[in-house]
Image: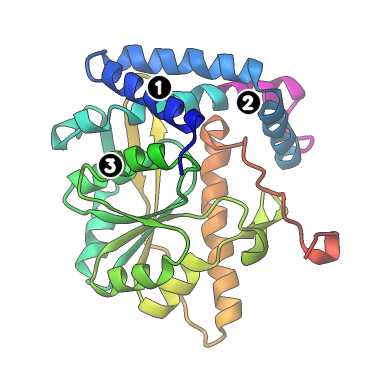
């Protein structure tokens, strides 16, 4: 049952969507930047989480003023992409070369041609929602694994936006069976692997710290033989994005499933870390990535 607050949130998003339909995109992005700075100033709790995470990650590598600059840039960026998501109905194949510029398209096309399915992975970095949307417009639609929003009205609207290019949405709980079916049909499945997986995860290094990470990507790759392709996006000064598909990750099955899953998960996480270090201000630092710690280090459970 929805609450009055949830309906109010949905009404606000509806009004913003209507506004986005006729305002120029550069105006919307500028508004997003301003809103991000306002949110950074007002939301003390998540501002503190952002800075605490940056200090954990970089230790003494960067001065405090640089960490605060990254934090402000992070809040601006995520407000911008939130607003930009309202533009999704306006994007199409015509947006290729204007809103999105590609590198490495041969990697993803070759992965699909193999016919064993594709596991496309990334993190909450750049504009990952735009990557998925535009891949549908490339004629390579995806099955997207997502966590539903707490507001069911907003979740319905977001699901509709995510699906405008032909993508299919799977909610995280109970999704593995459907993901297996999709891969065995030769389809692509998109998954982000950079958030704390709590006790369901395995611990691999991320910024030198043990980080609870989902083993799903590695497990599915070993079970199905699907291609594993990293993809990341970086904003350009004109508001467009450069989307880079990296070469397929080599998956070796040694006969030791536990060791293989750990090795593959650690390697894919290291790829995400490499991109985060290149442009730290476009990664989701307000998420408590190191909330779960190994039991030997004092973690619960």
Residue 257 in picture, x, y percent from top left: 55, 82
Q: What is the basis of the colouring in this image?
A: rainbow
Question: Of residues 241 and 25, which is closer to you in this image?
Answer: 25
- Which stretch is magenta? 59-73
Per the image, the residue denoted by label 3 is: 160
* Total marks in image: 3
Per the image, the residue denoted by label 1 is: 12
Residue appearing at x 39%, y 73% in the figure = 177
Residue appearing at x 53%, y 33% in the figure = 279
Residue 276 in picture, x, y percent from top left: 55, 40
For label 2, the SS is: helix
Residue 287 higher or lower than 240, as above or below: below
- Rounded to the nearest angstrom, the CA distance separating label 2 from label 3 is 31 Å
Per the image, the residue denoted by label 2 is: 71
The answer to whether any part of residue 81 appears in the image is no
Residue located farthest toward the left when viewing the structure as drawn: 94
Residue 146 — which label? none
Q: Decide whether the magenta segment is chiefly helix, strand or loop.
A: helix
For label 3, the SS is: helix
Residue 236 in picture, x, y percent from top left: 37, 25
Earlier along the polypeptide chain: callout 2 or callout 3? 2
């Amino acid at each position: 049952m929805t609450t009055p607050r949830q309906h109010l949130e949905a009404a606000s998003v509806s009004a913003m969507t209507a506004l986005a339909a006729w305002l120029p995109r550069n105006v919307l992005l500028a508004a997003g930047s301003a809103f991000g700075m306002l949110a950074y100033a007002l939301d003390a709790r998540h501002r503190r989480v952002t800075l605490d995470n940056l200090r954990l990650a970089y230790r003494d590598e960067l001065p405090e003023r640089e960490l605060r600059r990254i934090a402000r840039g992070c809040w601006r960026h995520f407000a911008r992409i939130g607003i930009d998501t309202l533009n999704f109905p306006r994007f199409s194949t015509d947006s290729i070369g204007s809103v999105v510029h590609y590198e490495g398209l041969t990697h993803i096309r070759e992965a699909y041609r193999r016919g064993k399915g594709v596991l496309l992975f990334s993190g909450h970095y750049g504009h990952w929602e735009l990557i998925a949307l535009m891949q549908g417009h490339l004629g390579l639609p995806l099955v997207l694994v997502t966590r539903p929003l707490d507001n069911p009205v907003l979740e319905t609207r977001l699901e509709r936006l995510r699906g405008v290019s032909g993508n299919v949405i799977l909610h995280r709980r109970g999704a593995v069976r459907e993901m297996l079916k999709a891969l065995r049909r030769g389809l692509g499945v998109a998954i982000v692997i950079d958030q704390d997986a709590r006790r369901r995860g395995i611990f691999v290094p991320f910024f030198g710290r043990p980080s609870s990470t989902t083993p799903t990507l590695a497990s599915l790759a070993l079970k199905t033989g699907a291609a594993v392709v990293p993809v990341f996006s970086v904003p350009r000064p004109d508001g467009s994005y450069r989307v880079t598909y990296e070469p397929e990750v080599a998956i070796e099955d040694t006969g030791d499933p536990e060791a293989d899953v750990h090795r593959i998960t650690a390697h894919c996480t290291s790829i995400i870390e490499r991109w985060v270090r290149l442009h730290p201000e476009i990664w989701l630092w307000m998420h408590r990535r190191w909330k779960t710690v190994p039991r030997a280090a004092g973690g619960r459970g």
